[in-house]
Image (cartoon, rainbow, N blue to C red):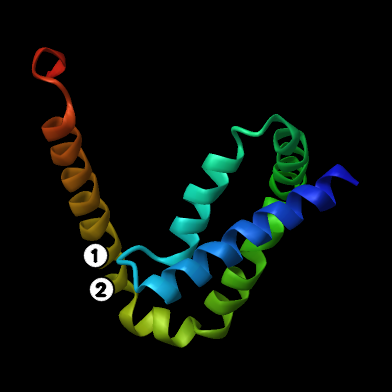
Amino acid sequence: MDALRGLAVLLLCQSAGEALARLTHAPLPGPVLGLLILVALLHVEALRRPVAAAADALLAHLSLLFVPVGVGVVVHLDLIARFGVRMAVVVVLSTWVGLAVTALVLRALLPGPARV
């Protein structure tokens, strides 16, 4: 029963984030705002246990969430055969760019003596 309550909290936070993003035209996406709302709500002791139960249930079945991706890959094998090398290059380059930007932002935000 706790898992259902926790799932309701998660879905309500995401819905509230979506509503907030649309109403305020915020530069952040709704799920990010929902996550911020959830972080604030996790300070309430009564919500921690249900959300933890929902998270445990979702993590236990995480592999099921990859089934649609696998089906999509199988359905579009012809596109992967045609553009696979280009897609792999883009994935690798974008990963490296993301890592570099993250490292630079972290370095800029760290206090002076803690920089490496």
| Along the line of sight, the residue nearer the viewer: 23 or 111 | 23
Labels in figure, total: 2
Compared across the picture, whether 33 is left or right of 67 comes to left
- For the point 23% across and 59% down, which residue is it? 94
115 vs 72: above or below:
above
Horizontal and vertical percent for residue 108? Answer: 11, 34
Residue 7, quarter of picture: bottom right
Percent of width and height locating residue 37 = 52, 50
Please, what secondary structure does the residue beneath circle 2 have?
Answer: helix
Instruction: Give left or right: position of 25 versus 113.
Output: right
Q: CA distance from mark 2 to mark 1?
A: 5 Å
Query: What residue is disc 2 on?
Result: 86
Q: What residue is rendered at 72% in x and 50% in y?
A: 58
Q: Residues within 10 Å of mark 2 (few under 14, many from 20)?
A: few
Q: Are marks 2 and 1 in contact (CB under 8 Å)?
A: yes
Q: Which residue is mark 1?
A: 89
Q: Of helix, strand and loop, which one carries label 1? A: helix
Residue 97 located left or right of residue 10: left
Indicate the quadrant where residue 28 lies.
bottom left
Callout 2 amino acid:
Arg
Q: Is residue 50 above or below residue 16?
A: above
Q: Position of residue 82 (x, y in %)?
A: 34, 84
Query: Please, what is the three-letter code of the amino acid marked with disc 1?
Result: Val
- Looking at the image, which residue sits at the far right? 1
Question: Which quadrant is the C terminus positioned in?
Answer: top left
Placement of 103 over or under 98, stated as above or below:
above
Image position, residue 32 (x, y; %):
44, 57
Residue sitting farthest toward the top: 113
